[in-house]
Image (cartoon, grey):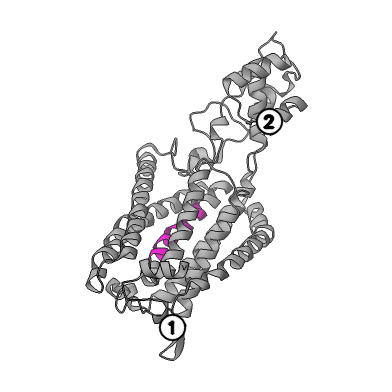
């Protein structure tokens, strides 16, 4: 029933599963028609991606981070206070003002001490630069390989140069093995990202990431079942073309290679703006909305596909606006003071001046003394991102902050 429903809404009227053969001879090789059961292989493939990622990060990414000079921050360790530890595990690790007042009264500490302890406790849970480098390097490798393989498999096709060929003979368009595996690998990879989202570096857009992964999986799966593979492969190729520039820029940012980071970010910005604001709406959306009507009449799958693509384009415009703001600040100010993109790590608001939160001379210091005060908070190294175009894109605080956070 599910398969029939997809075929009814995903293809023009009069076309059903019985009209779609499992295989068909094409030239010297053998191609297939897309069937929903083909997508079942993506789940074990996602598990294989997770296992491969663990091996890659341990054997390749970790030694590479050391070779490139990635350094981790050492945060001020919060004193051992079992009662606050219990509250942190059972409740919110970032208590509200009313909770701070209650804890101060309950444990005989000042609000400043309680607030400082929780801030240090949250900082201890921050992911290290090495961990973030490994995550970025894994995505960089996949996006680079996916883009290279996708380009190699599509550059000789007719629809790569003429988008009208995406609809010639639709929906009975056989799918080549290379394009089938391109689709399956992309879907399996995004499934692996969704399965790992709870253990990956959590950023401020954690919920948006989950929604994005689910929407991407749903879009790829629907376009496969509805046999929109030709235009779907082009859309995936466009997105992969800029993603590996972004991940490589993050890698060099964590390593402190500021010039390489800036160059890669500029390349990412150019490729992103051209592919997402020019090629994607000018060729992809125009083809799905206008050119496709020369080959079939509108049907539910046609409207659903275009609705998803328009939502995607709205996100492109939003991200392009933020990128252009960053580029403007970089060109006219020489730096980016604050990046409002969603790729900030969660809890960046904690990176404030801890110095003023410590007890003043003569105040009750409660369970800990001033030994972890100013001396422990002084740092010999500034944040690498302060002079990098990505700044808060990958981590950290505003460059206006007067107090370093690392030892």
Location of residue 324 (image quadrant): top left
Q: Residues within 10 Å of mark 1 (few under 14, many from 20)?
A: few
141 versus 78 height, above or below: below
Q: Are marks 1 and 2 in contact (CB under 8 Å)?
A: no
The reply to whether residue 81 is in sight is: no
97 versus 163 height, above or below: above
Q: Position of residue 235 (x, y in %)?
A: 38, 64
Question: Residue, x 69% and y 27% (percent of image)?
Answer: 376
**Left or right of 145 on screen, residue 79:** right
Q: Nearer the viewer, mark 1 or mark 2?
A: 1
- Count of marks placed on residues: 2
The reply to whether residue 124 is in sight is: yes
The residue under label 2 is: 88
Q: Which mark is residue 21?
A: 1
Span highlighted in magenta in the image = 235-249
Furthest-bottom residue in view?
Answer: 28
Question: Residue, x 57% and y 44% (percent of image)?
Answer: 202
Q: Position of residue 123 (x, y in %)?
A: 64, 34
**Left or right of 194 on screen, residue 277:** left
41 versus 122 height, above or below: below
């Amino acid at each position: 029933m599910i398969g029939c429903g997809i075929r009814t809404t995903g293809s023009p009227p009069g076309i059903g599963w019985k009209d779609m053969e499992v295989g068909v001879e094409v030239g010297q090789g053998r191609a297939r028609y897309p069937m929903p059961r083909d997508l079942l292989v993506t789940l074990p493939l996602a598990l294989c991606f997770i296992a491969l990622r663990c091996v890659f990060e341990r054997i390749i990414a970790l030694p590479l981070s050391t070779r490139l000079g990635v350094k981790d921050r050492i945060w001020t360790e919060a004193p051992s206070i079992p009662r606050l530890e219990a509250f942190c595990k059972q409740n919110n690790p970032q208590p509200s003002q009313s909770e701070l007042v209650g804890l101060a009264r309950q444990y005989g500490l000042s609000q400043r001490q309680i607030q400082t302890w929780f801030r240090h406790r949250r900082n201890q849970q921050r992911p290290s630069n090495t961990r973030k480098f490994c995550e970025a390097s894994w995505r960089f490798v996949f996006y680079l390989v996916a883009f290279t393989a996708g380009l190699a498999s599509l550059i000789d096709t007719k629809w790569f140069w003429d988008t009208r060929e995406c609809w010639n003979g639709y929906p009975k368009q056989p799918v080549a093995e290379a394009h089938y595996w391109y689709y399956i690998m992309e879907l399996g990879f995004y499934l692996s990202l969704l399965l790992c989202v709870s253990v990956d570096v959590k950023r401020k857009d954690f919920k948006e990431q989950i929604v994005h992964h689910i929407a991407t999986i749903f879009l790829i799966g629907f376009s496969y079942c509805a046999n929109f593979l030709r235009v779907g492969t082009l859309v995936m190729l466009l997105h992969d073309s800029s993603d590996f520039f972004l991940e490589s820029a993050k890698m060099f940012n964590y390593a402190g290679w500021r010039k390489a980071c800036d160059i890669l970010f500029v390349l990412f910005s150019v490729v992103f703006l051209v592919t997402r604001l020019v090629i994607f709406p000018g060729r992809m959306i125009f083809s799905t909305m206008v050119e496709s009507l020369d080959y079939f009449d509108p049907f539910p799958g046609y409207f659903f596909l275009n609705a998803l693509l328009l939502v995607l384009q709205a996100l492109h415009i939003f991200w392009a606006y933020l990128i252009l703001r960053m580029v403007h600040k970089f060109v006219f100010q020489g730096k980016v003071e604050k990046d409002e993109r969603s790729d900030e790590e969660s809890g960046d608001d904690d990176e404030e001046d801890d110095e003023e939160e410590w007890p003043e001379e003569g105040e009750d210091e409660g369970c800990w003394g001033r030994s972890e005060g100013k001396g422990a908070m002084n740092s010999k190294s500034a944040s690498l991102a302060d002079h990098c175009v990505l700044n808060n894109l990958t981590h950290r605080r505003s460059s206006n902050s007067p107090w370093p956070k690392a030892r």
